[in-house]
């Protein structure tokens, strides 16, 4: 145990020890390690305080900007982490944590994570990763096959070819989307005659050479904000991401899309890419991908599908057809750290054409020599960890049919939850689950009836109050710490396109039971009852 008088020293000798001597099993870190590998949920459960501490309070524990002059013993520091950090972190693996795409992990990733961290392979080049490079290429091949379903000889030819790549592995969906649009931009504004390509000469000269007034990226209004980041850093500008309106099912309106493409063409603005969303972040709906592919072909532009969240549905034979047409996309983003239950830091993009990535190839003399199989020559990121091993291991341990079971039960659980909500007169389901995501809110039955016949002004007055109520319930539920749903604003057509505050539920954790879902609704009803004093008299006044 810690002797208060004992002080760590910054000596070379003690530093050597850190590098060479493992933590003893009875040290604090050693015990944590054992506890975690025996009972992760229990470990987190015991260390998460249910009482909400405001962030401003927590910030006081992280206030110093000085790098310590006095070193600490590992055990002392571990106590500090437990006390100040772990105890105030979020129990994302709890079966009642159903508000976000970040969810529980299978146990086997813990020892694998230790192995991965310990080996510290760097995928930027073969000299620092060796077998990890072919493994990552195989993972990209498997994901490519999941999307495009080419035959064995296709993968034999391309998977390990030095000059080609079936995709790029990266830290997440944001970088995957940026990579896809980077490829789209460079292939569109490629070298041509005296012009040596946008990558070399920049956007200004590229537009001049090709005679375009500008570029545009077209996506539904439900598109993820990472696309705007991509447009920003690619020099196209955030305003050039054009939001196309959606239908009542939150899917892109293809007629609008086609008309916008034509309008832009008239203005001599080139559509660089049309982006389909396969599982929107807010409502989980899937765009009509096949129809969008047709429009992309008509206007001769890149077709990207952002399936960061919904892509794993392709592992389910039962539900794969929901993404019908995805195989027509030039590139597809998938996050393994969402519905493939891999720890964070595992995103990827696959390209239909193995030649696509040539347009973003970079070389350097000391590494990434021309013709080498170094993965760093066509990734945005430089040094990268061996995360592909986690995807590889998960696909082998869980297998395709195993993933299918996980995907199917998530979707079916969402349907069950939607039925519960619909069966209860005091809740309003705002978006039906297409995958395992839905939105709803609490609206007392009498108010619902009134809303149906209310005029627009009355509707607005009531919706303002209901927004407050939704926020109140969501916050109080989070603070109570028993369960968690998130909240977002979505436009609702039967309220004249008003943006309504809703609860958002993502049912990814296989340990979430029907009873937990029933409990979530029950708790929300109790919180609503508590809030009656908070609800202004106005509600009663509007109704009477
Ligand atoms: C999560 C998500 C992203 C961003 O992925 P990160 O891994 O958070 O960078 C992009 N698009 C969609 C549709 C997403 O759901």
Image: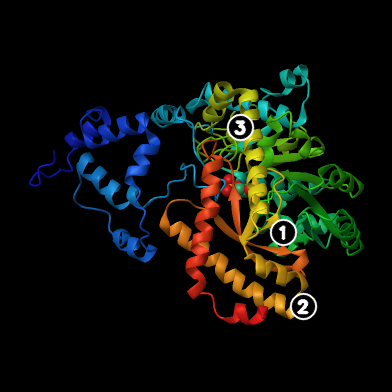
Q: Position of residue 480 (x, y in %)?
A: 42, 57
Label 3 Cα neighbours within 10 Å, binned few <14 / some 14-19 / many ≥20: many
Q: Is residue 241 above or below residue 161?
A: below
Nearer the observer, 278 or 212: 278
Q: Secondary structure at mark 1?
A: loop
Q: Residue at x 25, y 28 (%)?
A: 22
Q: Residue at x 61, y 25 (%)?
A: 402
Q: Secondary structure at mark 2?
A: loop
Residue 165 shows in this picture = no
Cα separation between marks 2 and 3:
45 Å
Q: Position of residue 173 (x, y in %)?
A: 62, 45
Nearer the observer, 33 or 503: 503
Q: Is residue 305 above or below residue 36?
A: below
Label 1 Cα neighbours within 10 Å, binned few <14 / some 14-19 / many ≥20: some
Side of 244 relative to 108 (left or right): right
Mark 2 and 3 residues: CB-CB less than 8 Å, in contact?
no
Q: Secondary structure at mark 3?
A: helix
Residue for badge 2: 455
The quadrant holding residue 544 is bottom right
Numbered disc in front, either 2 or 1: 2
Q: Position of residue 93 (x, y in %)?
A: 46, 41
Render colour scheme: rainbow
Q: Residue at x 77, y 70 (%)?
A: 496
Q: Residue at x 26, y 33 (%)?
A: 31
Residue for badge 1: 236
């Amino acid at each position: 145990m810690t002797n208060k008088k004992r002080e760590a020293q910054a000596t070379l000798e003690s530093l050597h020890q850190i590098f060479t001597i493992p933590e003893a099993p009875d040290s604090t870190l050693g015990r944590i390690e054992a506890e975690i590998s025996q009972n992760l949920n229990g470990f987190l459960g015991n260390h998460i305080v249910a009482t909400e501490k405001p962030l401003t309070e927590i910030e006081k524990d992280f206030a110093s900007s000085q790098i310590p002059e006095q070193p600490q013993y590992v055990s002392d520091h571990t106590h500090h982490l437990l006390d100040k950090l772990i105890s105030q972190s979020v129990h994302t693996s709890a079966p009642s944590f159903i508000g976000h795409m970040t969810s529980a992990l299978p146990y086997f990733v813990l020892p694998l994570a230790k192995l991965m961290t310990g080996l510290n392979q760097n995928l930027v080049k073969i000299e620092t990763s060796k077998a990890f490079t072919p493994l990552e290429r195989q993972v990209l091949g498997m994901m490519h096959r999941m999307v495009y379903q080419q035959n064995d000889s296709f993968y034999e030819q391309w998977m390990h070819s030095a000059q080609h790549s079936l995709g790029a592995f990266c830290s997440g969906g944001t970088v995957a989307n940026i990579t896809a649009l980077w490829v789209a931009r460079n292939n569109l504004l490629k070298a041509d005659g005296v012009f040596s390509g946008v990558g070399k000469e920049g956007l200004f000269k590229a537009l001049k050479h090709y005679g375009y007034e500008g570029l545009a990226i077209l996506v539904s209004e439900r598109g993820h904000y990472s696309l705007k980041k991509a447009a920003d850093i690619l020099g196209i500008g955030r305003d050039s991401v054009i939001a196309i309106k959606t239908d009542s099912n939150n899917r892109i309106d293809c007629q609008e899309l086609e008309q916008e493409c034509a309008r832009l063409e008239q203005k001599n603005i080139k559509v660089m890419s049309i982006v389909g969303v396969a599982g929107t972040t807010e409502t989980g709906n899937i765009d009509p991908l096949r129809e969008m592919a047709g429009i992309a072909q008509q206007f001769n532009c890149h077709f990207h599908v952002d399936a960061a969240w919904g892509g794993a549905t392709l592992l389910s034979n039962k539900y794969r057809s929901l993404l019908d047409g995805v195989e027509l996309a030039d590139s597809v983003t998938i996050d393994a750290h969402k519905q493939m239950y891999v720890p964070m830091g595992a995103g990827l993009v696959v390209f239909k054409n193995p030649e696509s990535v040539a347009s973003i190839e970079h070389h350097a003399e000391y590494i990434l020599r021309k013709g080498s199989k170094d993965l760093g020559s066509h990734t945005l990121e430089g040094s990268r960890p061996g995360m592909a091993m986690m995807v590889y291991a998960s696909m082998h341990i869980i297998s395709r049919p195993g993933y299918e079971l996980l995907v199917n039960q998530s979707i079916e659980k969402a349907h069950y939850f939607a039925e519960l909500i619909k069966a209860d007169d005091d809740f309003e389901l705002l978006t039906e689950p297409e995958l395992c995501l839905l939105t709803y809110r609490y609206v007392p039955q009498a108010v619902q009836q009134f809303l149906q016949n209310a005029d627009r002004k009355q509707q607005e007055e009531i919706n303002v109050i209901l927004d407050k109520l939704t926020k109140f319930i969501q916050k109080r539920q989070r603070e109570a710490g028993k369960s968690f749903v998130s909240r977002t604003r979505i436009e609702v057509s039967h309220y004249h396109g008003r943006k309504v505050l809703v609860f958002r539920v993502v049912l990814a954790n296989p340990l979430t039971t029907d009873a937990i879902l029933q409990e979530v609704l029950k708790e929300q009803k109790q919180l609503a009852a508590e809030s009656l004093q908070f609800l202004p008299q106005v509600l009663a006044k509007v109704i009477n």
